[in-house]
Amino acid sequence: MRRRAFCFALAALATFGDAAAVEFARVRRGLKLRFPFDHGAHPDYRNEWWYATGWLDLADSQRIGFQSTFFRVRTGIGEKNASAFAPRQLILAHAAIADPRVGALRVDQRAARVGFGRAGYASGRTNVWIGDWHLDQRDDRYRVDVRADKFAYALTLVPDGPPLLNGLAGFSAKAADAVHASYYYSRPQLKVSGSVTLASRTQAASGLAWLDHEWSSAPLPEAAQGWDWIGINLDDGGALMAFRLRRADGTALWSAATWREAAGKVRILSPNDVVFEPGRQWRSPRTGIAFPVEWDIRVGTRSVHLQPLIDDQELDSRHTTGSVYWEGAVTVSEDRREIGRGYLEMTGYGERIGFG
Amino acid sequence: MTLAPVFLGSLGRRRAATLFSFVAIVLGVALGMAVQAVHQAALSEFARGLRFMAGEADLQVVGPRGGFADGVYAMLAARPEVAAASPVIEIEARVDGHPDSLKVLGIDVFALAQVEPQLMPMAVPATDRLAPLREDAIFLSAAAQTAFAVKAGDRFAVQMGNQVVPLRVAGDLPGAADDRSLAVMDIAAVQKYFASAGRISRIDLRLAEGLTVEAARVALQNLVPSGVLIEAPAAAEDQAANLSRAYRVNLTMLAAMALLTGGFLVFSAQALSVVRRRSEFAFLRAIGLARRRLFTWLIAEGALVGLAGGLTGAVLGHGLAWLMLALLGGDLGAGYFSGLKPQLEFQPETTAIYVLLGVLAGAAGAWLPAHEAATVAPAQALKAGDSGVLAGQLAGRGRPWRGVALLLVALAACALPPLNGLPVGGYLAVALLLAGSVLLLPAAASRLAALLPRRGPVPARLAAARLGAAPGHAVIAAAGVLTSVALAAAMAIMVSSFRESVDEWLQQILLPADLYLRVATPQSSGYLDAELQARIAAVPGVGSVRFTRHESLRLAAGQAPVALIARPVSADAHELPLTASVQRTAGATAIWISEAMRDLYGWRPGQLVDIPLAGHMARVQVAGIWRDYARQTGAVLIDLGDYRRLTGDRLANEAAITLAPGTRVRELADALTATAAAGALQVAYPAQIRARTLRIFDRTFAVTYLLEAVAVIIGLAGVAASFAALAAARRREFGMLRHLGLTRRQIGWMLAQEGALAAGVGVLGGLLAGAAISLVLIEVVNRQSFHWSMGLHLPMASLVLFALGMTALAALAAVLAGRQAMRQDAVLAVREDW
């Protein structure tokens, strides 16, 4: 689970309202994920997200990070309302560019109810949109289109192999109690080509990206204050996903990791084998929140060090999903040697995620 | 400045005349100022409300009263021209157990942020982020929470259609101004509870960058169905301003006439004062005062009175405006801005203009006398007390052919078309009629004097002779009376004609019935659906029932919506207050249009026109024109059967019900209201509707009654001031008459008759001029401003009473004014100049 977080925020609250009247589908251990069907939306579940992040090399040799996230939320409201405006399903989206020349994220966000063709999702393949922002999968290639006020990008993401199933064949536990779990798979090592528009200038872009798809109806464990997550494309062709849920005192409530080696062998690591050690802190001048922007993470026998592309990759989404989080491009090194690049997400450093 | 006591001080020496001039100017300025300030406050409040509602929208998509299909939203939101589109459903909801209705906006909270951030609801407490989407959540502005005595978390039962929906106050609207009472709900919830699924009232659009609003408007207008219009948010502001502008201009013109009268009073006071001070001026000239400076000083006298009157009038006007706002509301009771709470604002420019108008009235009034005084050669003036020069000149100026010419021009001015929607020609005609009548007055006075019998007691013969011999003085005394009587009579005739016509119209326009049944909220949130209509018809005791559907049409961008009334109409429509009708073509669907439709859209009887019904253009024939006093922006009447056939809309808003024999009205009323939820339906009786309409009418014209009263006061002040000055100038004459053996009593009697004669001439002239002006008001000003016609009804009794009262009061004023002059010893008075 992870970042996707914000949805939990919305979902957790839905439990107090008419949600009781709505039966959300439950995440069960042992259900086998089927593709391409499970690339599509699962509207019976409360929350779902598609999360694309990655590093891009621009034609002017500038290196930037990009993020585009589409959330689907089933609100439990208006299930029996015949109105075409009935807010049964919402789509929320965040898009960002991490540009060292700017020194902070360029961000845009959207939210809409599903209907009138203004926002929606498809089943059977990844296809989710809000206005003219799209994430569309065809022939197992993803196409991302984002047009914001200050930036735009149109990227094609081509996977190198089948989906990487996290946890127990895609059943990803979030706590000791199996109630708190999601279905979760990743698409690492996505080859990116396309164009990026910054400051009214459009240029070709290429790089490597990571896509997560996760859905669930379960709320965040009561004791969780937030979480830290990484998704790293390793230079040797491998991939590393790790996350932990954090208590208010900073200790780990639960953690997990998936390491796909270059040869394709996948290791699923249990909570005891994943340790997140925060390093240098950066304090946001806007919100006053302090984020640990450097980390040492032990995954099994290996230890990696995380360093941000820029410190300020804070994203204030209080208008849409209602939280302030840090989502940024990082480089990963082992024994002071760079071994990969990817994204780091940190939530719950201000107010508790989902209850702010 | 050393001369200041000589000139300006003279104002203090003739206190009465100065006071009357001052009061007249004060009243003119105060009234004009008040009408202007009140209207400005109402308009700016109205505009503020529109701007608040429109938020940052570049364009608004509006439709008829019942709204339009929400598919229009899907289509427009996807257009490249549109950066953001926010759909809105606007309803007036009745709050359970509360007399006031509440404006509820059904909104999409996700679209609000980009187009109308000011309406953004805030959940209290803030933890429930989905609160704005919940079906039972309603967000009330602070003013609404106060008005309905609820706070966040409270239950809030709202009546929708004929059922009660239990809602919950989920929070407030921090962006709404403190005084704005409104509520916000999710658009899906409003569609659900109001059974208006698939309909929306409005879409607010923000355009993509780099597009001109007009180009985008034209492009998008072509895409939307018939009857749905796309317009700039400012259009509604203009509509409101246009709608009420005519009313405001009417009132302002009346105030301007009061000011004119004030100027005239200054003139009469100055004219006589100049006559009295001839030797004084001659002396000043002889010791070296330049002609120019004398002139300037005399103008300054008038200007000083004007300035004092203007300043006092501006202060009084603001006070009056405050009072009017408190008592009558921003539209002075006319109903253009109901529901607004305008705040009075001090406007320095406007105030300065009105003060300046006061000064101008004073200076203009002093112009002729000052010119006259400055022209006379000192030697001639020193020699003898010839006071008749100015008066003679005035008589000369009053040469009848000039007056006749002015009246002819007035007649021509009536034919002018409205300029920018304003009846400028009409106002010009009114001013010319007044001026022409004043110029004709001397001739009329001589004629009248010639008709008077040359017999009777000496004082009466003297009075008659004076009227015949010195019409210049008569002009001065009578012109003020004429002006004020003309204004008062014109207003009285116009208002009476209007009221009678409205009364007649009411009896024709209402469907004949014993009682009427309608939904409690007049807005779109309430109607009688087919099932309820059947239940109403089935109530025992109902003899016959006829339903009326109220809708509206959007015919042209920038124009206010036109009312569409669908009700049973007989084949020849004889029951309507028709002013024109034609034989319609066989097979054509007939509509009957109000006079405003003819003026605003140029439709003519017999013409085939297309009107948007249910999203499609329907071809109909104008079968006639009817008189409508209710809807200044136009109304179209169609037979209910035709309407239902063309639209498929089976809803109704009102039912006109006749009783079956042997039924009691009250019992039937109770049975009828019991067909729906308590409080959902209202019963009204024909007599009650008539009484209420006339009450609203009287309230609307309360201000004009006030103006009439002012006109009368000014007229009387004029008589008093003129006679005070005249009497002072005639001390020698009084002394002579005393020498000849007349008693004080006889002189007083003579003065009374002179006053009555002068005033009588003025009153007669005023009545004639007033009748002519009222015709102009009815046939030109009202037709052009409000687009309605009316029959002429003379309020004879009150006019006669008014005329007699005016004459008697004038006589009394003359006696009182003369008494002071007679106090002096007769011998001294005669010897004074020897």
Image (cartoon, coloured by chain):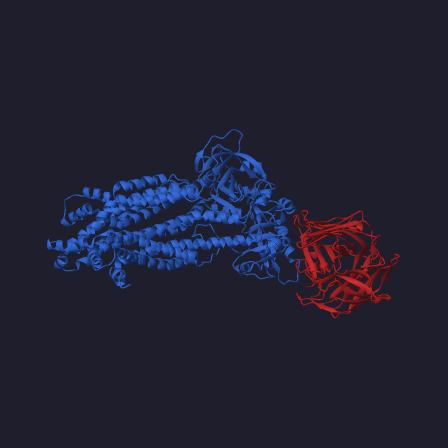
* Residue that sits furthest to the top in the current view: B586
Residue B500 seen in this snapshot: no
Residue B79 seen in this snapshot: yes
Q: How many marks?
A: 0
Q: From the image, state the color of chain A.
A: red
* Residue that sits furthest to the left in the current view: B740
Residue B487 coordinates in the image, percent (x, y): 33, 48
Is B421 positioned to the left or the right of B117 in the image? Answer: left
* Residue that sits furthest to the bottom in the current view: A249
The image quadrant where one finds the C terminus of chain B is bottom left
Is B635 positioned to the left or the right of B394 in the image? Answer: right
Q: From the image, state the color of chain B.
A: blue
Q: Residue at x 25, y 44 (%)?
A: B398
Is B360 positioned to the left or the right of A1 in the image? Answer: left
Comparing B170 with A108, the one in front is: A108
The image quadrant where one finds the N terminus of chain B is bottom left
Looking at the image, residue B575 lies above or below residue B313: above
Comparing A251 with B705, the one in front is: A251
Looking at the image, residue B602 lies above or below residue A8: above
Residue A184 coordinates in the image, percent (x, y): 80, 57
Q: Residue at x 45, y 54 (%)?
A: B40
Is B234 positioned to the left or the right of B405 in the image? Answer: right
Q: Quadrant of residue A48?
A: bottom right
Comparing B423 with B3, the one in front is: B3
Residue B618 coordinates in the image, percent (x, y): 56, 36
Residue A301 coordinates in the image, percent (x, y): 87, 66
